[in-house]
Image: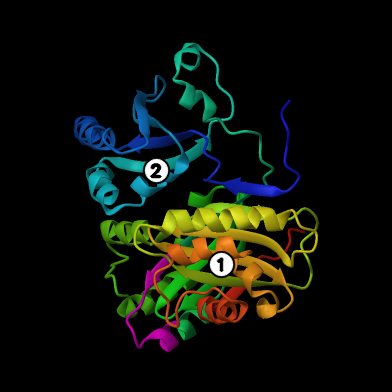
Amino acid sequence: MTTLSERISQSAFDGSRLRVVLLLDLHDGAQKEFLDAYEHLRNQVASVPGHISDQLCQSIENPSQWLITSEWESAPPFLAWVNSEEHVETVQPLHSCVRDTRSLRFSVLRETGEFFSEAPDQLKRRLQASPRLGDGVVRHALTFTVKPGSEKEVAKILAGYTSPAAQVDENTRLCRTSLFMHGNRVVRAIEVQGDLLAALRHVARQPEVRAVEEAINPYLEQHRDLNDSDSARMFFTRAALPAVHHVAADGPYPADAHRHALYYPAKEGCGMALAKLLAKQDEVAADSPDSPISSSTIFQRDDIVVRLIDLSGPLDAHPALALGVSGPRKAAMFARLLATPQGGMPATDKEMARFLARSDMQLITDRSAEPES
């Protein structure tokens, strides 16, 4: 019998197989160049741990439309690959061939057919256990660093922008944008109802947003030229900070909830493990009617881990719960995954409170779209 969770949940950590679908629209006359680039990409990805197979398909109705599908043992190895510098460099030759792309990622819930009947037992077991309940919202974040010493000026610029129109098209709407800083690191989290890519393109075209992006350009540690499509694409590709886990408690959003972002400095190579540990803790907290946390979203790329929480009451009222680490055993695991923070690893409640204060990111702006009339 299929069960359905009553709370909103999305996760890259359920252990199920992953199906990735990439839709492409090629430039006229770019077919040979595209096929050469794909062969190079296919040979590279075949040796990536966790990769199972891929297919290249061409539309029978419009030969300019192509489809690449790939299957992975689970989401974490795919995310590690797609967010790597190796992947950025490998797919670079594809960009000159492609007019438009769209990437979709799915956990495998059910499967039938000859392949499934003959598949190894470990693959048969790697199916999503049960459907999850969604809320129609896509969550994504961007992160980048600015030159040390420019933080106050950058914060002033970022806080002063005019919000773009919330309605993108008949199917897509901007719901909320939250922007934080931690030292010289900027994190911009967005929530979109509908098509994330359409929303990002819509925002990028708005003159008020473009003016802000141009104003912070001189302060960025990574150079970018927004008038150069390759430069802009590379910057935003490297800045992508995907949501790997989201959970919201059952019930209406509390009127007294406030949004916080916590920055976790993961030890080298431990970012994914740290995000997974926090995700497990948030799943448990979401089932507790006494938890002050109404929702949590974990963003992770390499060793950058940011946890966005909507919380009722003071952040420091329950330090371990706010950090997402409850219990001595979990605290010890948490400490082992962290890069050594100033002041030592958090273990006691007092140390947890100090670590929480250091992790709490500075809120620059948090804007929600007006409800639809």
Residue at the spot x=32%, y=65% of the render? 226
Badge 2 element: helix
In reply to whether residue 149 is colored magenta, the answer given is yes
Residue 251: image quadrant is: bottom right
The residue at which mark 2 appears reads as 77
Residue at the spot x=44%, y=41% of the render? 103
The amino acid type found where label 2 is placed reads Pro
Q: Nearer the viewer, residue 122 or 186?
A: 122
Residue 224: image quadrant is: bottom left
Q: What is the quadrant of the N terminus in the image?
A: top right
Q: Say the numbered circle drawn on residue 248.
A: none
In the rendered view, would you say 150 is above or below 352?
Answer: below
Residue at the spot x=47%, y=26% of the render? 123
Q: Position of residue 163 (x, y in %)?
A: 57, 71
The amino acid type found where label 1 is placed reads Pro
The residue at which mark 1 appears reads as 164
Q: Position of residue 264 (x, y in %)?
A: 48, 68
Q: Is residue 252 left or right of residue 84?
A: right
Residue 102 seen in the figure: yes
Badge 1 element: loop
Residue 29 seen in the figure: no
In the rendered view, would you say 143 is above or below 38?
Answer: below
Magenta extent: 143-154
Mark with earlier residue (2, 1): 2
